[in-house]
Structures are given as structure tokens and as C-alpha cells.
Image (cartoon, helix red, strand yellow):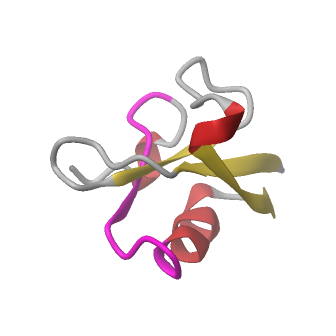
Amino acid sequence: MDYYYVNTNAQSNGDHEVHKESCQYLPTSVNRKYLGYYSNCADAVENAKETYPKSNGCYYCCYACHTS
């Protein structure tokens, strides 16, 4: 289980990346939204899509959910 966050700032392609709390690329506290405590990235990304429909897993910490 991990704590997950979504970057509130979109990347250049429009994606909002979802990160584990332990990720070295976790956005600063003012640029992220807490998603919850999940056993997998898929559930965290689904939660993020409720606010940011174009959400995606981080390449580094949520590779299984990284799609673009």
C-alpha cells in the first residue's frame, strides 16, 4: 500500500501524472493533490481521472499505469 498524489499541473502533452509519495519526481506540496492510500496505481489513476480526465501513471514510480 502506498500514498498517491496527482500533479495539478499538466505536462506539455496535457497529462496529469500520478505519483507515489516516495517518488523522487513527486511535485511540491502546492502542485499536487492527495488521492489516497491504495494497493495499486490503477485505483489511484482512476481516482485522479475524476478531476483530471487525462491522468497517467508516472514512468518512474507507477510504470504499470504509465500510458503516454
- Which one is nearer the viewer's eye here, 15 or 60? 15
32 with respect to 4 (left or right): left
Q: How many marks?
A: 0
29 with respect to 16 (left or right): right
Please give the name of the residue rendered at 54% of the width and 68% of the height, measured from the top-left corner: 48
Return the x and y of residue 40 as percentages of the image width and height: 66, 58
- Inspect the magenta stretch and tell me whether residue 18 lies in it: no
52 with respect to 4 (left or right): left
41 vs 29: above or below: below
Return the x and y of residue 55 as percentages of the image width and height: 39, 62
Furthest residue toward top: 24
62 with respect to 68 (left or right): right
- Which one is nearer the viewer's eye here, 29 or 26? 29
Furthest residue toward front: 30
7 vs 24: above or below: below
Furthest residue toward left: 13
Please give the name of the residue rendered at 52% of the width and 65% of the height, measured from the top-left corner: 45
Please give the name of the residue rendered at 41% of the width and 46% of the height, measured from the top-left corner: 9
- Which one is nearer the viewer's eye here, 64 or 3? 3
42 vs 13: above or below: below
Return the x and y of residue 36 as percentages of the image width and height: 79, 62
Q: What kind of secondary structure does the magenta stretch mostly adopt?
A: loop
Return the x and y of residue 31 as percentages of the image width and height: 57, 40
Q: Which residues are magenta?
A: 49-60
Please give the name of the residue rendered at 52% of the width and 82% of the height, measured from the top-left corner: 50
